[in-house]
Image (cartoon, rainbow, N blue to C red):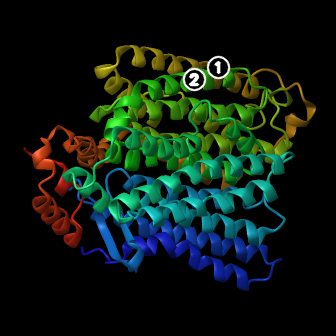
Amino acid sequence: MDMPSHLLTVIAFLPLLGVPALLLLRADDHVWIRRIALAVSLAEFAISLFLLRGFDAVNAGYQFEEYFDWIARAGIHYHLGVDGISLFLVLLTTFLTPLAILCSWQAIQENVKGFFIALLVIETAMIGVFVSLDLLLFFFFWELTLIPMYFLIGIWGHGRRIYAAVKFILYTMFGSILMLVAILWLYNLAGTFDLQDIQAKLQTGMVLLPARTELLLFGAFFLAFAIKVPLFPLHTWLPDAHTEAPTAGSVILAGVMLKLGTYGMLRFCLPLFPDAAHRMAPFIGILAIIGIVYGAMVATVQTDLKRLVAYTSVSHLGFVVLGIFAFSTISVQGAIFQMLSHGISTGALFLGVGMLYDRRHTFEIKEYGGLINPMPVLMSFFLFIALSSLALPPLNGFIGEFLILIGTFQNHHAWAAWAASGAVLSAIYLLWAYQRVGFGEVTVEKNRNLPDASGRERLILATMAVAIIFMGVASPVFTRRMQSSTNNLLNQMERVHNVSRPAMHDAAATQTAVASTSQKHLPATAISLRRAQP
């Protein structure tokens, strides 16, 4: 079956088509506002499945590419494409957005139109980040994700929402400024914003980065991405943002937005700056391990259930960063899988916490207890999701962490040993939290007659449970499509710095190779799978 030639454009911008439809409705027509937003997000998910149908697992390069000059004189291009690294992140985004809309069906009663417009805009922005192959286009979508999330937290959040929203925007904007400087620096060196052209010039030696310059550029990109992850010690904005955000905001933030940082490390930091990545890997690995252990230990002592779940992200995404900078095919595959798994499991945890909040309007663990009696269905789903998050085989959480630990152990035994303690600690804080919330006697009278999960809530939780089981038992469906792109990524890190100087300065040969690649816009695989020979 032939895929539409502009499939990525349709997927990226379809959510925006729902915005004019919502604007035409009256502000008090809440029913149709919700229905249209849900219909658009479901259509978006259905269309995104065509990516899976048409994706060639053997092809390590970019697929479904779209390319044309946007601002030709400035070297700015509208260039889209996906590979095995970004494919499932796009699908994760389109999968979680309808669930975020459903969970807000009754919870959001004020400024309903603006809320659902913000959700649709942020869906377009996040997909744009994952499919952009032009650095300036990537930066445009990267910045676009900040605006609707800022409003989701600041307008529809809880108590200290303004403080959390401002903290979120200040942290992420600081990183964005550094990344923009690095992008402009690369443009000055390469004469283009196109990622493939820049990679081609770096691979062939047409553009040479001195060690200090490469380290500075790597640092600028990495800091922006580390803030977004967030990596210890840049994580302090996350618990506040999660705690004060509405449930849908937390689902999108944990499920997708945090993955923009780890995706950026894979897409830019490793292939563009391999020497700097190797030099900084020991330091980054230590920070990742500290984040794993620290996030888990802080989660254990939390008295606020939503804040507890927020700190689990610091711990779990520490595993992702560790897997990336272990530079093993298995660990990088595990990191990508863990990104997807965390999006499902932690997103589901926030959904469960949000459902409890809708009934009691508190996140304090001491205000619960014995909820398994009045709410057996909701609490059973909550336990299942907790088991997924603590990496119980054969659920989805186990696959990613196991691959990361195996791949890390191949090159860094001590790293893997320390990181494994995070898996033990995750069982402690999640099971202890569930014990205090679900088991024991009902000590608060209000909890005795709490309603169990409604039909809408059961649909949401059952959908997440199916995804958890499917990812756990059918993991080859994912890893098989990641493998070629993962190998290609690590091959791209084999820079021509080992090539002799005369060969690197053979200008005619270099110009021919780069021009040919630039004209045909071949996947990065075509220019990076083999080292240049002296």
Q: Residues within 10 Å of mark 1 (few under 14, many from 20)?
A: some
- What type is the residue that disc 2 sits on? Ser
Q: Amino acid at mark 1?
A: Met
User: Which one is closest to the eye, mark 2 or mark 1?
Assistant: 1
Q: Nearer the viewer, residue 236 or 304?
A: 236
User: Residue 173: horizontal and vertical position, in percent?
Assistant: 64, 52
**Left or right, residue 265 beside residue 275:** right
> Which residue is label 2 attached to?
426
The image quarter in which residue 254 lies: top right
Q: Is residue 43 left or right of residue 1?
A: right
Return the residue nearer the eye: 93 or 500: 500
Vertical comparison of 132 with 529: above or below: below
* Mark 2 touches mark 1? (CB < 8 Å): no
Q: Position of residue 317 (x, y in %)?
A: 52, 35
**Toward which corner of the image does residue 469 lie, by quadrant?**
top left
Q: For the view shown, which residue lies furthest in the right direction?
A: 445
- Residue 22, given in percent of the width and then of the height, sits at 69, 79
Which residue is depicted at the point 73% across and 20% down?
301
Q: Say above or below: 359 vs 22.
A: above
The residue under label 1 is: 297
User: Extreme left residue here?
Assistant: 534
Q: In this picture, is 6 found above or below 454?
A: below
